[in-house]
Structures are given as structure tokens and as C-alpha cells.
Amino acid sequence: MAEIKNGYGRESGRGLQYNVEVSGCIGSECYANGTPMGVWLGYEGYKDLYVRFYVKYSPGWKWTNDSISPNTAAYQKFLEFAVYNGTVGDGKMDGPRATTALGGELMPIWIVNWYQYITVTPSYTIFQNSERYAPDYSYNNATNDFHSMNPSLYPIAPPMMPSPPFPAGHQARSVLWPTDNEWHSYEFRARLNDVAGLPEGGLSEFWLDGIKVWSKSGIIWVKAGGSLERGWNRINILDNSDIASYSREDHMTMSMYIDDVAISTNYIGPDYGIGGVDATAPASPTGLSVE
């Protein structure tokens, strides 16, 4: 459940409270929750798009509990860029229906995931880059983009972390997700490749509190035979999560807060505020609607 209300935002302003249900287990069969904010940008979409928002986790937020789900990880989809090639309302936009086998039209997709692992105190996070390509809904091997496998994707070497229990040996460093109960700025950029089947132009970037922590170029979002007629036209802020800090029978929910969502065709930065801030607004897309 999500609610927009005064006092939920930064500086006690208006913001969105997102109550996340604890799944009590880990795995695709355990997915809980959905996006509290889906934004439709119109059929044409945008080839190059930036999305920035602020997030704060509640003080009582608890990711994992070794007695509930030993040696596993909490999981959360943080953001999703997508190109929808169908017609709104045809039932082929979300979830498994997006796949080619079921006649789906939602591709390519960039999903920003992260995992919170149990280890020695404190627990730590792993950033996972998940890509789905057009026109066949094929996808990347996400572990290849871990810092240990491809450190060139990380402009600043993330903090050194203990080796995780899974996947063994892959991750020595990771983007540290803030869990200090303070507001933090997250900004993401996705740009489609210029020509179907060729890598030029295709990229993804991620800034945490204005510091670029991820940059990947040469992404063939649209492979040979695919169409670049439409750009990124659907954004989901937050989505599915698996959190095993309590058992499913506890029916536990925990709150996180979202504020100052901005979507632009240029870099936004953490200093551009929504309402009342003396800053030049970045270029905004047209045709916005919220699902």
C-alpha cells in the first residue's frame, strides 16, 4: 500500500509512504509487493532518459533474519526502465506476459536490483545490473557485471566487503546501499543504442547522492531485427521484493519513503528540488502520466 501525505517527504513536506510486505522467504515464488509509482511517458518515449528520486528507509526496517532464512539475501527491484511496443490496455505490459513466448511487447528493459546479504555485522549490499533485450527478451548474465568480474563499470571502487555466501567468490566489493534512515538521492540514466544490433550509444549510468557509481556503455538494448521506433516509455519506481526478516505468518509490513521524483532528458542532480528551490529545472519529457 502507498499513500501520499504531508510529513512523509523531505523536511517534513509532502511525500509518498510505501508499505512493503515481508515475504518471509527468498526466490521467485516469494515475490511480494509491486510498484507504488508507475509512469507512462507516451508511445513515442525517449531514447535517452534520466530518473531521479529520494528514498529513506524507516528506522525499524529490517532486511534479514538468519533464523528465518539462513544464509540468504533480501532482494528488491529498485527501478525499471522499459520500452513498451504494444497498445496500452492489451494486457501484455507487465510480468511474465511481457515475454516473447507469451506475445509480450515489453522490451528492452533495464532493472536495477540489489541484494542485502547476511554475514558478519553489518550486513552488506550487492548492486545487480539486469538487462532484457529486444526483440527476443534475451538477458545478460548479471554476475558478469559484479565489480569482481568487471571493475571498469564502477567509476569509483566500492567499499571492500566480506565474500558473500552466494554467489560464492564473485563479489569482493559492492555499491553500499544506504540504510542509515536518512534521505538519499538516486539517479539513473538509460540510453538506447543508435542502430539495432550495434553497441554505439547504448548505456546505463547510476549516481548515488550525486556521485557516479556505475557506468556501462556499448549495451545492445535492441538487437538486429528489433525496432528503435519507440524509446523508453514506461518507468516503475520500486517493485517486487523478497524480505525474510519475519515469517510470512507474521503479516509484517515495513515503511519506506519516496520524495522529489524527477524525470528528464538531461542530468538532474541531487540539488534540484521539487517546489521552492532556486534551481534551473532540467528538461522534462512531455506526455507524463502516473499509473
Image (tube, rainbow, N blue to C red):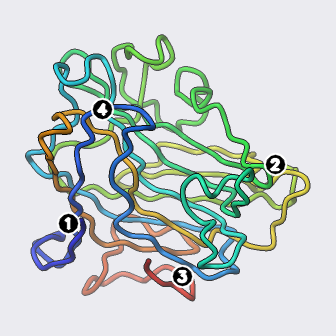
Look at mark 3 in the image and give the residue it sits on.
283
Check if mark 4's residue and mark 2's residue have beta carbons within 8 Å.
no
Nearer-N-terminus badge (4/2): 4
Mark 1 residue type: Gln
Element carrying mark 3: loop
Quick check: marks 2 and 1 in contact, CB under 8 Å?
A: no
Q: Distance between the Cα atoms at labels 3 and 4?
A: 42 Å
Front position in the image: 287 or 49: 287
Q: Gap in Å between the C-alphas at discs 3 and 2? A: 26 Å
Farthest-out residue, right: 225
Q: Residue at x 63, y 45 (%)?
A: 131
Q: Residue at x 33, y 40 (%)?
A: 242
Numbered disc in front, either 2 or 1 = 1
Q: What element does badge 4 sit on?
A: loop
- For badge 4, the amino acid type reads Cys
Comparing labels 1 and 3, the label whose residue is closer to the camera = 1
Comparing 85 with 140, the one in front is 85
Instruction: Look at 62% across and 27% down and name the residue there.
Output: 144
